[in-house]
């Protein structure tokens, strides 16, 4: 176990950064919405955490570590960016076809990104296909473990195809039926995004920080 201290003046600066969205909203619209307050509250928690993570990655670990692997972080972000860029380009090229154009929607791309982070991080950290000298990790979830035992890259591929299918169901197959429930659909999409990005970001940071 370890701990790191953030100097009071620097913590105050991070808190000010978290407050900026409220200030910007008030100056621009003269109102402060609940969403803006919640967003700033989230930043108040997240920004110091990312500062400590950044300090660790830059060479100041505050606990035991196998070493930092920033190359893994860059590799996974790069692969995901390429996949998302490819999906967006296809959707943009066929933008006149509504069934394909839905895949360039930012929320839909976010769902893909969240689950690709989870799938690719699990695959790369466990099997180390690029021989990056990573510590030994194991998959604890029986479903994803079974997929990777069949063929290691199968887990991220299945995750990608499942999100493609989910987007098709929401935005194409049942679009008319769900039009009046647009807020609920968006909440479901955000939930799906969180289900992917939460374990994915946790695993990606663990591998990057060598813990």
Image (cartoon, grey):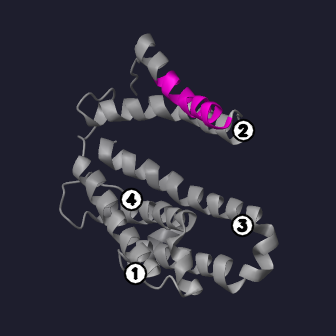
* Number of residues whose C-alpha sits closer than 10 Å to that of mark 2, classed few (under 14), some (14–19) or many (20 or more): few
- Does label 3 or label 2 sit earlier along the sequence? 2
Q: Nearer the viewer, mark 4 or mark 2?
A: 2
How far apart marks 4 and 2 lie (CA) works out to: 43 Å
Which residue was labeled with disc 1?
A: 150
Which residue was labeled with disc 3?
A: 185
Question: Above or below — where is 109 with respect to 96?
Answer: above
Q: Quadrant of the N terminus?
A: top left
- As for residue 17 lying within the magenta part, the answer is yes
* Number of residues whose C-alpha sits closer than 10 Å to that of mark 4, classed few (under 14), some (14–19) or many (20 or more): few
- Disc 3, SS: helix
- As for residue 89 lying within the magenta part, the answer is no
Closer to the camera in the image, 115 or 39? 39
State which quadrant residue 38 falls in: top right
Q: Quadrant of the C terminus?
A: top left
Which residue was labeled with disc 2?
A: 33
Which residue was labeled with disc 4?
A: 138
Question: Above or below — where is 65 with respect to 148?
Answer: above
Closer to the camera in the image, 189 or 118? 189
Q: Nearer the viewer, mark 3 or mark 2?
A: 2
How far apart marks 3 and 1 lie (CA) works out to: 34 Å
How far apart marks 4 and 1 lie (CA) works out to: 15 Å
Query: Which residues, given as a range, are shown in magenta?
Result: 14-29
Q: Which secondary structure type mostly characterizes the magenta part of the structure? A: helix
Image position, residue 131 (x, y; %): 17, 62
- Does label 4 or label 3 sit earlier along the sequence? 4
- Disc 2, SS: loop
At 37% from the left edge and 46% from the top edge, which residue is drawn?
A: 206
Q: Nearer the viewer, mark 3 or mark 1?
A: 3
- Disc 1, SS: helix
């Amino acid at each position: 176990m370890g701990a790191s201290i953030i100097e009071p003046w620097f913590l105050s600066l991070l808190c000010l950064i978290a407050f900026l969205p409220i200030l910007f909203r008030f100056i621009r619209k003269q109102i402060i919405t609940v969403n803006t307050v919640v967003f700033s509250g989230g930043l108040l928690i997240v920004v110091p955490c990312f500062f400590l993570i950044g300090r660790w990655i830059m060479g100041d670990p505050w606990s035991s570590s196998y070493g930092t692997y920033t190359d893994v972080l860059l590799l996974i972000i790069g692969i995901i960016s390429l996949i998302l860029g490819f999906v967006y380009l296809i959707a943009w090229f066929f933008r006149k076809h509504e069934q394909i154009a839905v895949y360039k929607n930012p929320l839909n791309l976010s769902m893909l990104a969240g689950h690709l982070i989870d799938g690719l991080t699990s695959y790369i950290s466990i099997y180390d296909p690029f021989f990056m000298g990573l510590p030994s990790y194991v998959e604890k979830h029986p479903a994803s473990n079974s997929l990777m035992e069949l063929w290691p890259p199968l887990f991220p591929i299945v995750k990608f195809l499942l999100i493609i299918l989910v987007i098709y169901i929401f935005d194409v197959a049942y679009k008319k039926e769900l039009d009046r429930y647009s807020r609920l659909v968006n909440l479901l999409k955000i939930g799906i995004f969180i289900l992917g990005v939460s374990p994915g970001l946790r695993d990606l940071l663990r591998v990057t920080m060598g813990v």
